[in-house]
Image (tube, rainbow, N blue to C red):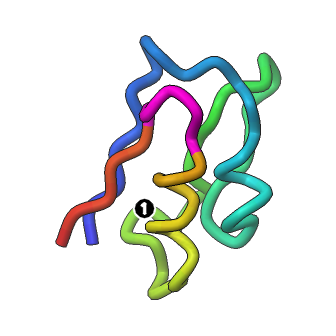
Amino acid sequence: MRIDIDKDICIGAGQCALAAPGVFTQDDDGFSELLPGREDGGGDPMVREAARACPVGAITASD
């Protein structure tokens, strides 16, 4: 799986980190980022839910 975070539109709502805390975290400024080693989602079934939960659509997950 490929996960992309559009840092230009991310508002730091944190819904991704809440939905899939094993894949997403927030940087020091509160913006979304992937945890080290989880760039492919690590098989976490909640990655797509995290993308859907983003209020501004900053996350895309594709196969």
Write the residue at 42% across / 37% down.
Answer: 5
Write the residue at 75% across / 65% down.
Answer: 21
Expressed as whole percent of the image width and height from the top left, the position of residue 8 reads: 43, 12
| The one of 36 and 32 positioned closer to us in this rendering | 32
**Which quarter of the figure is the C terminus placed in?**
bottom left
- Residue 6 is a magenta residue: no
Name the residue type under label 1: Glu
Q: Which residue is mark 1?
A: 39
Write the residue at 64% across / 55% down.
Answer: 24
**Which quarter of the figure is the N terminus placed in?**
bottom left
Magenta segment, principal secondary structure? loop
Considering only vertical position in the picture, is 29 above or below 12?
above
Expressed as whole percent of the image width and height from the top left, the position of residue 59 reads: 42, 43
Considering only vertical position in the picture, is 39 above or below 30?
below
Magenta segment: 54-58
Query: Is disc 1 placed on a helix, strand or loop?
Result: loop
Left or right of residue 28, residue 7 in this image: left
Left or right of residue 43, residue 27 in this image: right
Is disc 1 surrounded by few (<14), some (14 to 19) or many (20+) residues within 10 Å? some
Write the residue at 45% across / 87% down.
Answer: 43
Q: Residue furthest top?
A: 8
